[in-house]
Image (cartoon, helix red, strand yellow):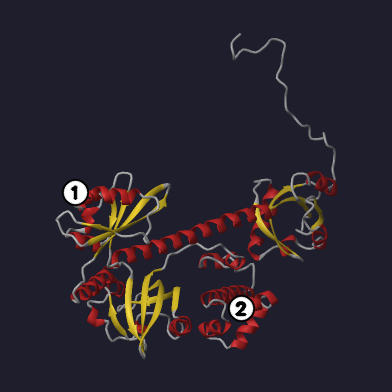
């Protein structure tokens, strides 16, 4: 018998449910029946008033849902959910569609995120609204976003550590070679190694490190790299270079990276350098700083620019370094009257500032968000400041409840017109913006309320009042802010 043939005398069962199989159920019975489908069931009458509520999930507040019985459902949800409530009721009466919509149900204990859908009950125009609890889903999304943010922070720390290593590696006056002991090839070299060996340091990569030394010393260098106990504190090995020059010594140390072992081979001269060598080192240092991709600027104690590198000129679209020297840094850096005062205060108190967010203004008036690190160095009675400026890295922060309530565009803001009064829209939006700005100012100033008040242009008393109004007045919050 073929696969498409039908067995004689047998008929396929019909999956039919007669309309009277479950009888005529009233609205309350139907609510209890569908409670197995959702965590919350609301019975809404023709006028949109909640006539009954049933909660099946044990962790949901049954008594708070009973308090909204007798009220219009549209009045018990958040502002942005009122349109969704109207759509659910309309589609349920017309039996035109069945769609789930996420709505924040406002209860006495606060907002509860639920996914709602409605079905016409067929009894006097009543509608059964089924709701599913979204708190577990939102908590999972929050954990995912927090994990993503933690990964971004770890990535930034790794990039910063790599940048510091690269700068130190490039400006070191001692010749340094990174060697793979398994094949004895050079992985990386700094400019000082190229100067000592008389070649371009970029050409050293991939070459055998043994070719750099006189044949008589190659075995000793090999043994030095293979010595598992090698460290910078070990006795230096006298060596001679491949061109016959002697008077050099080598020190090796091993480190492990990604499961592989690498060697750091440091070369230094035993000869006394002429005083001009210091000038050469300074000249090399200035050349390296001039080619660093991040903007670098040095100012005096009054924040007047003393020197800059090429990246600073490109960032501010300046034609030459002379156009920047002598100019006040406040002309190009910081928001007027706010950022630099906070920055200078932290420099004076702590001697350094890291990852300070601000803006730069080019000579043509264009602004860009940047992040800077600064250090203050004192030489005698005078002090100077050094700033490293880089474009700000944009990371999507974990959305807070304030951000989720804030309209993302003017178009979304206008959708609230007709559903809320202008006073309600302006008040709600203003509160969210004030709360966000205060929180950001506290984060930027390390929870220093005096500095945050100055940054926001408020008196300390006004800031304390707003902190109390927005719920920052708890003992834990005050303790963290005063720390």
x 27%, y 50%: residue: 220
Relative to 183, residue 189 above or below: below
Residue 169: x %, y % from top left: 32, 63
- Residue 474 visible in rendering: no
Q: Which residue is mark 1?
A: 215
x 57%, y 63%: residue: 399
Based on the displayed image, in which of its 4 quarters is residue 390 positioned? bottom left
Residue 98: x %, y % from top left: 66, 46
Camera-side mark, 2 or 1? 1
Residue 101: x %, y % from top left: 64, 53
Q: CA distance from mark 2 to mark 1?
A: 66 Å
Q: Which residue is mark 2?
A: 481
Relative to 295, residue 192 above or below: above
Residue 156: x %, y % from top left: 45, 62
Residue that protrudes farthest toward the top in the picture = 1
- Residue 372 visible in rendering: yes
Mark 2 residue crowding within 10 angstroms, few (<14) / some (14–19) / many (20+): some
């Amino acid at each position: 018998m073929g696969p498409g043939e039908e067995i004689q005398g047998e008929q396929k069962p019909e999956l039919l449910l007669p309309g009277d199989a479950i009888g005529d159920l009233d609205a309350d019975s139907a609510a209890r029946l569908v409670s197995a489908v959702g965590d919350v069931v609301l019975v809404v009458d023709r006028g949109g008033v909640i006539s009954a509520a049933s909660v099946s999930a044990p962790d949901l507040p049954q008594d708070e849902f009973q308090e909204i019985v007798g009220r219009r459902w549209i009045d018990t949800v958040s502002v942005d959910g009122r349109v969704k409530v109207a759509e659910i009721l309309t589609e349920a009466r017309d039996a035109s569609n069945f769609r789930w919509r996420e709505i924040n149900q406002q209860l006495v204990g606060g907002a509860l995120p639920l996914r709602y859908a409605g079905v016409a009950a067929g009894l006097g125009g009543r509608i059964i609204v089924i709701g599913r609890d979204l708190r577990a889903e939102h908590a999972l999304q929050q954990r995912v976003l927090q994990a993503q943010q933690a990964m971004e922070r770890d990535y930034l720390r790794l990039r910063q550590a790599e940048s510091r290593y690269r700068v130190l590696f490039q400006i070191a006056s001692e010749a340094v070679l990174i060697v793979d002991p398994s094949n004895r090839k050079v992985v990386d070299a700094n400019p000082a190694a190229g100067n000592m060996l008389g070649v371009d340091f970029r050409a050293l990569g991939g070459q055998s490190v043994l070719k750099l030394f006189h044949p008589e010393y190659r075995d000793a260098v090999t043994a030095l790299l293979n010595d598992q106990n090698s460290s910078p504190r070990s006795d230096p090995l006298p060596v001679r270079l491949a061109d016959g020059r002697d008077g050099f010594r080598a020190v090796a140390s091993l480190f492990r990276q990604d499961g592989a072992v690498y060697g750091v081979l440091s070369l230094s001269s035993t000869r006394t350098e002429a005083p001009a060598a210091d000038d050469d080192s300074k000249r090399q240092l200035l050349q390296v700083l001039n080619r660093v991709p991040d903007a670098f600027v040095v100012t005096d104690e009054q924040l007047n620019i003393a020197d800059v590198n090429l990246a600073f000129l490109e960032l501010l679209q300046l034609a030459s370094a002379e156009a920047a020297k002598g100019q006040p840094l406040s002309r190009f850096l910081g928001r007027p009257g706010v950022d630099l005062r906070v920055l200078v205060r932290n420099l004076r108190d702590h001697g350094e500032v890291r990852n300070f967010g601000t803006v730069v203004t080019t000579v043509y008036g264009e602004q860009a968000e940047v992040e800077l690190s600064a250090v203050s160095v004192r030489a005698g009675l005078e002090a100077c400041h050094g700033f490293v400026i880089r474009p700000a890295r944009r990371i999507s922060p974990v959305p807070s409840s304030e951000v989720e309530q804030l309209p993302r565009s003017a178009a979304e803001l206008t959708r609230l017109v007709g559903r809320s009064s202008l006073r309600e829209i302006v008040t709600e939006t203003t509160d969210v913006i004030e709360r966000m700005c205060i929180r950001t100012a506290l984060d930027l100033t390390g929870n220093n309320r005096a500095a945050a008040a100055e940054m926001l242009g408020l008196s300390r008393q006004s800031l304390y009042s707003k902190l109390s109004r927005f719920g920052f007045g708890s003992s834990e919050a005050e303790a963290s802010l005063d720390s």
